[in-house]
Amino acid sequence: MKKTFKLSHDRIKPERLVEAIKHEVKKYIKRERKRKLPAGVDFLDFDCRFGAEEISSDVIHLSEINKSIDWAVSKELDSFYLEIIAKPGHRTPKPAETEQDH
């Protein structure tokens, strides 16, 4: 998903617009996670970028999306850019415990 969201609308209240945007993002992530995983992939990871514009967007963690949207609302931006790209994720094995660790 690469999209520029507008935070103003002539008929929709700003609070409802923000809720709709957050719902759309949540629905997209849920839909992507339901997809069948390719062979050799443990889980789907997401690369996320957020900013006032596409050019000035910064890398953020998936869990920071709602905070970033709230930040854009608090700064009274007219719109913001959000990019969420699914990528394959691989789990790293835990290091083996030794007797010295106990």
Image (cartoon, grey):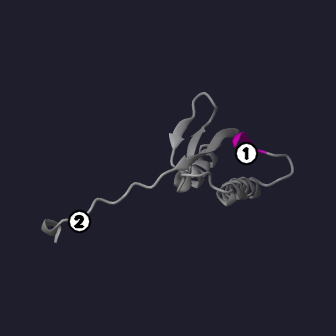
Tell which of 75 and 82 is nearer to you: 82
Task: State the residue position of label 1.
Answer: 7
Residue 48's spot in the image, x, y percent?
A: 57, 44
First of labels 2, 1 by sequence position: 1
Q: Is residue 100 left or right of residue 67?
A: left
Name the kind of residue labelled 1 in the image.
Leu
Find the residue positioned furthest to the front.
39
Q: Left of 77 or right of it: where is 42?
A: left
Q: Position of residue 6 (x, y in %)?
A: 74, 42
* Residue at 52% from the left image edge and 39% from the top image edge: 59
Q: Secondary structure at mark 2?
A: loop
- Which quadrant is the N terminus positioned in? top right
Does the image show residue 77? Answer: no
Image: magenta residue range = 1-8
Mark number displayed over residue 97: 2
What residue is drawn where x is 44% and y is 55%?
91
Residue closest to the eye, 22 or 62: 62
Q: Position of residue 61 (x, y in %)?
A: 51, 49
